[in-house]
Image: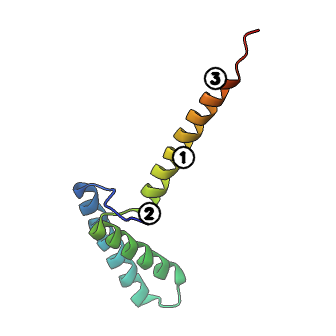
Amino acid sequence: MNIKPNIGLLNALIRITIGFTILAWSTSKLVKRPWRESYLVAAFFGGMKIAEGIVRFCPMTALFERSQEMMGNWKNDKKQEDEMTYNPS
């Protein structure tokens, strides 16, 4: 799979900022209550956003773009099939 940047620079900077904010919040809460797993999940989510911003690749955006491309191909194939099977007699 070819991984190339699919988000812009401003979007990447926003993801990094929000990721560090979530990571700082969740680690500060995790220090007070280490038995809560929800803060650990939030820390993982924040780290994931930081990584997406650094590499400028979002897997959800890539998945959405790929599904849109496949739907476009499917619609074109369906349209061509309908045109070929049309019999006006």
Lateral position of residue 14 relative to residue 68, left or right: left
Quadrant position of the C terminus in the picture? top right
Q: Amino acid at mark 1?
A: Met
The residue at 31%/56% (across/down) is: 7
Calculate the distance from the C-alpha at mark 1 to the C-alpha at mark 2. Answer: 16 Å
| Residue where numbered disc 3 is placed | 83
Q: Amino acid at mark 3?
A: Glu
The residue at 48%/52% (across/down) is: 66
User: In the image, which is nearer the foreground, mark 1 or mark 2?
Assistant: 1
Q: Amino acid at mark 2?
A: Pro
Of residues 55 and 10, the one drawn nearer to the viewer in this rendering: 55
| Residue where numbered disc 2 is placed | 59
Q: Position of residue 47 (x, y in %)?
A: 37, 76
| Residue where numbered disc 1 is placed | 70
Q: Secondary structure at mark 3?
A: helix
Calculate the distance from the C-alpha at mark 3 to the C-alpha at mark 2. Answer: 36 Å
Calculate the distance from the C-alpha at mark 3 to the C-alpha at mark 1. Answer: 20 Å
Circle 2 residues within 10 Å: few <14, some 14–19, many ≥20: few
